[in-house]
Every structure is written in structure tokens, then in C-alpha cells.
Image (cartoon, rainbow, N blue to C red):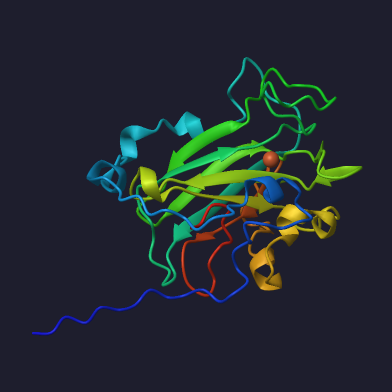
Amino acid sequence: MIATVRPFDLEPDGVQPPYDFPAYTSTQKRAPKRAPIHVAHSLSEITGPSFGANWSEPIASDLTHQGKGEPLGERIIVEGRVIDGDGRPLRGTLLELWQANAAGRYVHKRDQHDAPLDPNFLGAGHAITDDDGGFRFLTIKPGAYPWRNSHNAWRPAHIHFSVFGAGFASRLITQMYFPGDPLLALDPIYNSIPDAGARERLISRYDPELSQAEYALGYRFDIVLRGPRSTPLENRT
Ligand SMILES: [Fe+2]
């Protein structure tokens, strides 16, 4: 019997950002100038760790109850699936999230933006995807924040996501944006992705069905790991 190996679905050109994008100034320093050196992965790097459904507490995906009181800002639900190019779910994967607070400030010593910290908001959480590849976070809509890429540059509101994958060597990172943000057209990180359709896949979709009456607005965001509908990623090699 001859086994048939189906090749991976290749994504079209223009989905992934280049390493060096001059308008995003720090890429000029960190883009590799030499060909990569192949370093073989060890077994432990490609086979683990793995996460069971009980690995994470449900509270880890609720960023609105990390302090003594509730954080300030617009409460949002972010729900979606992590899937491959054929729509198959990535089950039991660790999905991590980090973001600024409603005023556009991170809890990080290097963030010196002149905006208030919120004692009730840490801005980090995680979830393990369910059997359908699904995840759900309750959080606060992040604010825009200035960065020193150029004079008067502001990052559009965004949430960082990390997909852990099957092991340490397969972690992928991306950013989710919000519909209708006027800063998107000016943002060099967002615009470093050449393909317009790929850029739009980084924008979450407002979903009135997901919104919870009198409580929170709902946004949907799927992360597609491969194929023609794949999500642009920051650290793909
Ligand atoms: Fe950020």
C-alpha cells in the first residue's frame, strides 16, 4: 500500500510581514542580516509541554476579576477558534493574551506612557482551547498608546495573542485589532503585512449575538494557522 502524503496548504505571498520594514523602525535593527543557521530541535522542544483541560483555571481567562475591584473601561468578550487551514480545531493548546489597560498603559516597568495604571487590571490572561478549538476571554477594551516609532505615532487598540502549539519550538504570536479604528491606516506594524485581505483578518468582528445585554460587547477573532485564510504572525520562520 502506498501512503499518500497531502502537502501543506501554502499561503499566498503577502500574508506574513517581512523581517525588515523600514517604516517600522526597530525592524531595521533586529532583522537578520545573515542566513539563518539550522539548529536541530530536541525531542523535548517539539513534544511538549502539553496542556489538559484542567491545566488552567477559568479565572485565568477573566481579566476583569484580577484585583479587589473591577477595572475601568469598556468590558468586552473576545471569542474565537484556533483552527488549521482545513478548519480543523487545534485542541488543548495554550492561548495567552496580553494588552494595555483602557487608558493605553501596560503593567510593565518599561512602559512610561503618561497614562494611569489601573490597580484592578493586570492585562494578562490565558486559556486552553476546547475540543472545538474554541476560546473565550472577558476583558477590557485596550486604549491606544503612543510609541516612539516616529513623531506622534500611536498604536491602534490591540490585543497580543500567543498560540503555544504542540511544543516550545512552535509558539506563534499575533495581534488582534478592532473594527473602525482610524489609527490602523497609519500603523506601520499593521501595514507591514503586504496583503490587504490578510491585514483585515487581524481585525476582530463585532458580533451583537456575542454581546451580553447590559454587560459587555462581543468581538469574534479566529486564528487560522495555515492555508489561504491564515492569520498573519509576527514570528513565523
Ligand atoms: Fe502592544
- Where residue 208 appears, as percent x and y from the top left, is 68, 56
Residue 208 as seen in the image, left or right of residue 62 = right
- Where residue 135 appears, as percent x and y from the top left, is 48, 48
Q: Nearer the viewer, residue 38 or 100?
A: 38
Q: Nearer the viewer, residue 65 or 194?
A: 194
Residue 65 as seen in the image, left or right of residue 115 = left
Residue with the most extreme right position: 152
Tell me the residue at 60%/47% (across/down). Answer: 78
**Is residue 149 positioned above or below 114 on the image?**
below
Q: Quadrant of residue 112?
A: top right
Tell me the residue at 70%/34% (across/down). Answer: 100
For the N terminus, give its image quadrant: bottom left
Tell me the residue at 41%/30% (across/down). Answer: 57
Q: Nearer the viewer, residue 38 or 124?
A: 38
Tell me the residue at 56%/40% (across/down). Answer: 97
Asked whether residue 17 appears in the rendered view, the answer is yes
- Where residue 19 appears, as percent x and y from the top left, is 62, 57
**Is residue 30 positioned above or below 120 on the image?**
below
Q: Quadrant of residue 202?
A: bottom right
Residue with the most extreme front position: 34
Residue with the most extreme top position: 68
**Is residue 29 positioned above or below 114 on the image?**
below
Residue with the most extreme bottom position: 1
- Where residue 203 appears, as percent x and y from the top left, is 68, 59
Q: Quadrant of ligand 1?
A: top right
Residue 10 as seen in the image, left or right of residue 206 = left
The mark total stands at 0
Asked whether residue 62 appears in the rendered view, the answer is no
